Image (cartoon, grey):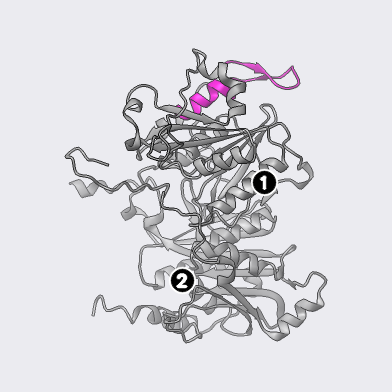
Amino acid sequence: MYIPADKKKSKSFEGYTLIVPAVSVGNVGQLASDLLISTMWLERCGFIYHDSILPLVGNDPYAHPEADVCKLVTACEVYESKLHQLVIIQQRAPFVKGKMSSFRRWLTGWVKENKFEKLVILSSMHAHERLDIQLQGPQFRYISTPDLEAENKERFTHDVLKWIPLEGRPSLEDPEGSLYLPGGGIAKSLFEDCSKENIPAIVVLVFCAEGDNAQDAVKLAYNLNLWMDLIDFKPKYDLDGKTIIKPASTWRVPSSWRLLFGTAVDQTLFH
Amino acid sequence: MATFFGEILPVISRAVDDDDDDESFENLETYVKIKWKKEAQEEMELTKDKKLQVNAFVLAVGPAATGFTQTYVTHKNYEIIGAMFCGMKEDDVNTFGQMSPTDKTCYIYRKCDYPSALVCECNYDIRPEYAHSFVNQLMSCLNLCEGHVVIFGSTFTSEYKSDVPTSDMNPPFMRALKTASFLGTPMAPYLEQPNVATGLPAQMLTYCHIHKLNAVLYMCYTDSIHLDFATLKTFQPLIESTPVKYMREENKKASETLKKIVDLHTKHSTLYM
């Protein structure tokens, strides 16, 4: 269930793009969402309160490291950018086992109800499941629904992007190769649901192994930004045509990314 | 995956489990049951929205938090008006008195001379899968629009991430989180990023946050497996917190009660016999 943060401001997201991270290997989708939200200084516009997501609360993940205020963050939240006609969902806790499909049903319903223009799914795939042809070269792939593919064919193949569609996995039943996304979480099933429901959708993903996946997230966010042109590293005018939006100098890493490897170890252990 | 030495190992991911089948293994909604006393039920029927009017609500989760509320709040002048049942199995040993460490009980108490003050004492950890249903069922019976909610919980310092090594942390210590509607300052420092709270306390705070209720979560970080005095003492300053200060009951025998509670949880331990 979507609950707007401010009931008075609630409106439809007609024509907006929705970015959803899949809880996938290395949490790359979620990390990339974090980078986008943090670098664009997006505003939280609501919460997703659904029984399929495990509970979690914490303090503001994008806060200044020295800040001493409490701005509560919950398991699944929605961020909005009017300028870019963009909505980003951030999911911070895993699904309850066996409840993924009910979330998918709700999400596709919500996308239709709000008339989102397209759905972008951020995901990742186990690096050890790569085919031989995938071992070398760019580790970024995409899969898109035919309508979105037709619309963006030129951009995807353009020299700036040079995006490679995810290679299918041939099997006995399907020698042509079918969509195979091990470790991609909800991405595959959500993408298939979207195809069935005629929602234009695209999955963007990187191959990765688990560890410190910050660089994989940057790779994913960087490639997405090349296509969607969300974050300008050059100055640009706001919607009113007067105020200049300061360019971002670099990706802004959220303070919640600290202590990835846990608490510092007592150094006396090594004496 | 093949390792450097050619050994084939299964890959375990912290983020995903590809075996996650789409079939629900149990119905989470029916797994949590709430029962009200007849009087409370009748009272609910009489109100417009079929909910109990509550101004002060305390949710204590886990043995440390319930030990604290049992000693300083609900030890007298409180009556049980309801109970919640969740995750009980047929072979669980249960005395229903919260007087055995194996008891899995969750009672809702009401202050006799302040009927809009409720305390929910849940002396065991509810599995996080059930937290959503638990909170929804409980809150569907309470009208807390004007009220204050406080949630007490405890967890281990091993869950706490910090620049300081665990050995220098001086546990037990208290951390707090609050909803945007709570305008005061909690009586403990805020929980620092990247730490998070999970489970039932997190679900309750989430519910309060999105429904714009005043709520504070106090989370005690302890390093002892069994309940001990130090952990219970960490909660003690919180008897001055809103709304506990309006609900507490003077307990002259507080230290005796505390001792009884600590004994209850430690005497079965055979580790240092």
Question: What is the distance, in whole Å, between disc 1 and disc 2 at their CAs?
Answer: 43 Å
Q: Where does residue A251 sit, x and y in percent of width and height?
A: 50, 27
Query: What amino acid type should be assigned to the residue bearing mark 1?
Result: Gly
Residues flagged by tags 1 and 2 on a common chain: no
Q: Nearer the viewer, mark 1 or mark 2?
A: 1
- Provide the residue span drawn in magenta: A219-248
Camera sees residue A154? yes
- B227 lies above or below A93: below
Query: What amino acid type should be assigned to the residue bearing mark 2?
Result: Ala
Q: Where does residue A180 sit, x and y in percent of width and height?
A: 43, 38
Res. A40 mark = none
Residue A244 lies in magenta, yes or no? yes
Q: Where does residue A127 sit, x and y in percent of width and height?
A: 35, 35
**What residue is drawn where x is 37% and y is 35%?**
A208
Query: Is residue B99 found left or right of A46 in the rendered image?
Result: left
Camera sees residue A72? no
Which chain letter goes with mark 2? B
- B129 lies above or below A78: below
| Pointer 2 local density, CA inside 10 Å: few below 14, some 14–19, many at least 20 | many
Residue receiving disc 2: B64
